[in-house]
Amino acid sequence: MREFRYERAADPAAAVALLAAEPEGAFLGGGTNLVDLMKLGVATPDVLVDVRRLTSAEITDLPDGGLRIGAAVPNADLAADRRVRERFPVLSQALLAGASGQLRNRATTGGNLLQRTRCPYFTDVTTPCNKRAPGSGCSALEGVHRNHAILGPTLEGPGTCVATHPSDMAVALAALDASVRVLGADGERVVPMSGLHRLPGDDPSRDTTLRHGELITAIDLPALGMPSRYRKVRDRASFAFALVSVAAAVRVVDGVVDDVRLALGGVAHRPWRATVAEEALRGRPATEESFAAAAGAELAAAVPLRDNAFKVPLARNLVVRTLLQLTEDPR
Amino acid sequence: MDTEITLRVDGAAHPLTVDTRTTLLDALRERLRNTSPKKGCDHGQCGACTVLLDGRRVNSCLVLAVTVDDADVTTSDGLAAGGEPHALHRAFVEHDAFQCGYCTPGQICSAAGVLAEARAGWPSGVTDPGEDGGDLTDDEIRERMSGNLCRCAAYANIVPAVAEVAAAEGVRR
Ligand SMILES: Cc1cc2nc3c(=O)[nH]c(=O)nc-3n(C[C@H](O)[C@H](O)[C@H](O)COP(=O)(O)OP(=O)(O)OC[C@H]3O[C@@H](n4cnc5c(N)ncnc54)[C@H](O)[C@@H]3O)c2cc1C
Ligand code: SF4
Ligand code: FES
Ligand code: FES
């Protein structure tokens, strides 16, 4: 591991100023991803600015029935919060479907959003990887890619990358139309979840649209007002990353879909908001047939690799099951 | 880069100079010679290094020692107050909840965390939506302990050991 200086700042603005002067420095949240990547030689910061207790660790009510989640709120506390469980069960369930009790106790909301892909070549510095070492190639394209992307990857050129974003929480936040409050050297800005994570495009080294030294301070959740749920399929019953997951919310009036939110995890370089399926569902009867047609429309864009085509029917079936479950038993 | 810290471990304060790269796990084992927490994977994947940090279970292999110089660290050793085994220690022995014992201190600290989380009503991934998480059924124990792997696969005895203490503490109906 590269040597680094460890810094604490007096307040968020001071932390931002500190990092602005350190092009190779990084913020440290719970460290459950960053320290791991530093041990592996994938992340090599020369300065760590500890922000775990710097941003708010509170969850506060917003006037419209929404919630503001401080970036330092531990994943475990967010999942257990009664307001989250009552108003946004999809978020609580997504968090509880991820990692382990120990990790959730230490991991922060901000760090969870910015955790990096679990692609095995990204974490192995002896192999080519365009995300870690731009221009070196993508080992996963022809290699082990059973758990890689089926939607929106870059399949050729120097930007080739078929990795997925690993966060469960982020999938729920995408479905919830959350927005991310960010503090930079030029002040504060608000980034909608739909504009935070990127597709690989021609630069897979960048997971998000954030600039170096921008600090996530809080996440805002607008009121939802419909039942919601998270379902995750993985290789073992617990403590494993998603093969495919779905975050869904739906409101049915007189047998017709009045409003719906759908996001998929484990299928793309970013949490995948299923806008095509949502569009296909609004105003349609809330039946298994409409759910299947909408999921099929979304997945028509899938470009599976040699060994991950199973994710296409898996995603379709998971969307249908989750929507059926939500409309039949909308707890 | 050397930094001075004080680690409070199992009730005693230890002033230490550590390289910033030192994890809490390495500081405990290599510097303080507290070999209760074990190094299995060193990547957060096995739970052998689990300790309680201000009462909450964490993986000490992913915690940098410099970040916790104001926290109370409790290892499985420290749960044996005054040399008296903790209820979880006794239950693990009675139920034969191990073979080699390597994962056991991590399992014990994790189980202590599970009991506290259940007392606080925290749900888990298998709790019915809308329900409180205060009833540690076998399924709940399996889910909540899933961050602790046992290479000897003593799971069949770990679950009843944790269940016994959960029942005694009123978090299992
Ligand atoms: C074995 C294992 C299994 C896991 N399983 C799952 C799983 O199933 N599902 C899942 O979703 N996750 C899983 N995780 C990942 C886990 O959720 C993340 O490691 C955790 O959420 C990261 O949070 P942190 O606070 O520890 O981040 P850190 O490791 O501290 O930081 C992560 C990144 O975010 C940056 N950062 C941190 N805070 C801020 C901030 N406020 N502003 C700007 N940048 C910031 C850091 O610089 C770093 O780049 C797993 C992890 C492990 C080790
Ligand atoms: S999929 Fe992306 S992260 Fe994985 S090897 Fe290819 S470029 Fe690297
Ligand atoms: S050694 Fe820490 S989780 Fe395995
Ligand atoms: S008892 Fe041997 S690893 Fe668990």
Image (cartoon, rainbow, N blue to C red):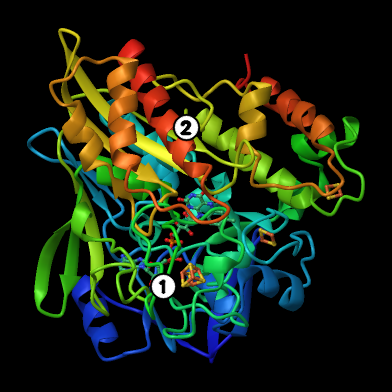
Q: Residue at x 36, y 63 (%)?
A: A114
Some atom of ligand 2 lies within 8 Å of the CB belonging to the residue at label 1 = yes
- Give the total number of marks visible in the rendering: 2
Residue A88: give x, y in percent of width and height: 28, 32
**Mark 1 lies on residue:** A160
Is residue A331 something that shows in the picture?
no
Q: Is residue A70 above or below residue A17?
A: above
Q: Residue at x 13, y 32 (%)?
A: A65
Residue B37: give x, y in percent of width and height: 74, 60
Q: Is B167 displayed left or right of A16 in the figure? A: right
Q: Is residue A230 above or below residue A127?
A: above
- Describe the element under mark 2 as helix, strand or loop: loop
The amino acid type, in three-letter code, at marker 1 is Thr
**Mark 2 lies on residue:** B122
Q: Residue at x 33, y 42 (%)?
A: A300
Is residue A42 something that shows in the picture?
yes
Q: Is residue B54 above or below residue B157?
A: below
